[in-house]
Image (cartoon, grey):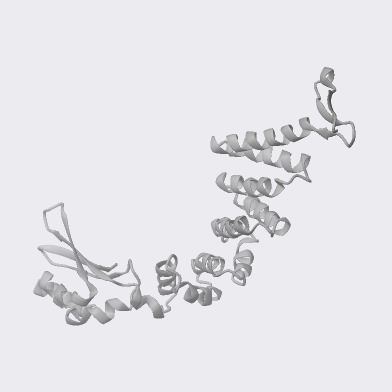
Amino acid sequence: MLSLVLAGMLSGNAELVDLDGPAKSVTAESSSEGLLREAKTLRYAQRWFEAAQRYRAYIAQYPNSGRLADARFWLAATLEQNQQWDEAAKAYGEFLELHGDQRLLCAEAKLNRIHCWGMRKGQSADSIPGLAAALADPTDEVQVAAALELAQCKDPRSLPALKKGLALPAYADACSLAMVSMGVKPEAAARQARFLVIRIKESGKPEVVTIRLALALARAVGSYLSDAQVQQAKAKGYDVENLMDQAGKLPKGSLLFSVEDKNSSVTITVE
């Protein structure tokens, strides 16, 4: 029968000793968990610097812990919250290199690292090369996230991933706008536009009247414009009688055109 005795009580470093087997330290296990709990508490209190210190201490003191992956991930996330972008990107990289089997945390770590690199575009030597390398990631979401950051620098390497992003509902609008900003027509943009939003502000009145028209009813826009405003729109290259095709080529959030006369100003956006 297994016999256990409590030893070392006078020293304050209690151990459970199995007389038929090796000793198992209770103090070491509780100390490691306590350090992680302290780091978590500091992180929840938004005391990022102190939390990062605790996570680093845990990693150094317990290199064989089964919770090392958690500690490394939350160290990186804490540095990111503290806006230590370069240190956070490096910490995410170490996590990904050492804990590639953590599928869900790895997916988040990749996207968070892209955010860190994006915050340092033009300032850190690692940011642009890191973003460019992420374009080859096997995950579409990671490719698109990196492309959106690179598109802000008008980097043409982002275009293939931006086109891929047009098919992802969560990224379609952002990718469309990014491509337009780079002077490239997004082929799938027509599927994104659903309404024309007409905002009318009459002179001398603070209120703005907002009218939403289904894209199929775009021909009715002319009824909200004065003759002078219709002429302004035509001068800008917009045929008020045939707006549906023109609006359908633009991504959501795009300003179609704006016109004004002495009585009112009108803006029309695609949403």
- Please tell me which residue lies in front, 135 or 155: 135
Query: In which quarter of the view is residue 97 placed?
Result: bottom right
Residue at (35, 76) in percent of width and height: 191
The residue lying toward the viewer, choosing from 142 and 236, is 142
Residue drawn at x 67%, y 45% is: 71
State left or right for residue 85 relative to residue 242.
right
Quick one: which residue is furthest to the front in this view? 1
Is residue 251 visible to the viewer in this orientation of the structure? yes
Name above or below for residue 35 compared with residue 147: above
Q: Whole-percent x and y of residue 234? A: 19, 80
- Residue 164: percent from left, percent from top: 49, 75
Q: Is residue 238 visible?
A: no
- Is 226 drawn above or below residue 21 in the view shown? below
- Please state which of residues 124 and 269 is positioned toward the viewer in this rendering: 269
Quarter occupied by the N terminus: top right
Q: Which residue is drawn at 13% across and 63% down?
A: 264
